[in-house]
Structures are given as structure tokens and as C-alpha cells.
Amino acid sequence: MFQNIGVPGLILILVIALIIFGPSKLPELGKAVGSTLKEFKKSTRDLVSDEEPTKTQPEKEEKAI
């Protein structure tokens, strides 16, 4: 989806964000987006790690039988 956005597109998005939010709110907005992405990645990692043991347990039981 974002593969077609080039450098000019990113510059345009940053300029529009600067106009809308202003220079004082932009760092706060960036920090909020960063912490949200960090939490999302952590939750995704936890979810994937929780699913792996349930998939491997039946395989181990089948091999033991």
C-alpha cells in the first residue's frame, strides 16, 4: 500500500502535517505514534509466541505415541 509513496510524497505529507498540527505539536504527535507502534509490535510478538506452543504440542504428543 505504501510502496508507491516516494520521497516527494513523504515531503508533501510532512509539510501538510506541519501546517495542520504546527511545530509545537509535531514532536508530541511523533512520540505518540512511535509508542503506539511499539505497543502494537509487542502485542503482535506476544500473540505469535502464544500460538506457537499450541501448534507444537500436538506434534510432540503424536511423536510420543
Image (tube, grey):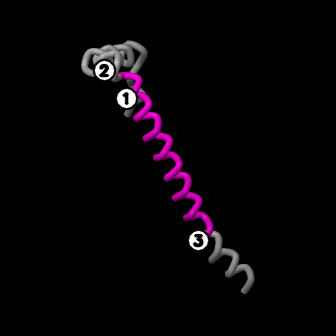
Q: Which residue is mark 3?
A: 54
Q: Is residue 59 left or right of residue 45?
A: right
* Quarter that holds the N terminus: top left
Instruction: Decide which of tag 2 and tag 3 comes sooner along the chain.
Output: 2
Report x, y in % for residue 37. 46, 40
Q: Which residue is mark 2?
A: 17
Report x, y in % for residue 31. 44, 31
Q: Which residue is mark 1?
A: 29
Quadrant in the rendering for residue 58: bottom right
Q: Give the camera-side residue of 62 and 17.
A: 17
Secondary structure under tag 1 reads: helix
For the residues labelled 2 and 3, the Cα–Cα distance comes to 44 Å
For the residues labelled 1 and 2, the Cα–Cα distance comes to 10 Å
Range covered by the magenta-colored residues: 26-53
For the residues labelled 1 and 3, the Cα–Cα distance comes to 39 Å
Secondary structure under tag 2 reads: helix
**Do the CB atoms of the residues marked 2 and 3 lie less than 8 Å apart?**
no
Other-residue count near label 1 (Cα within 10 Å), few / some / many at <14 / 14–19 / ≥20: few
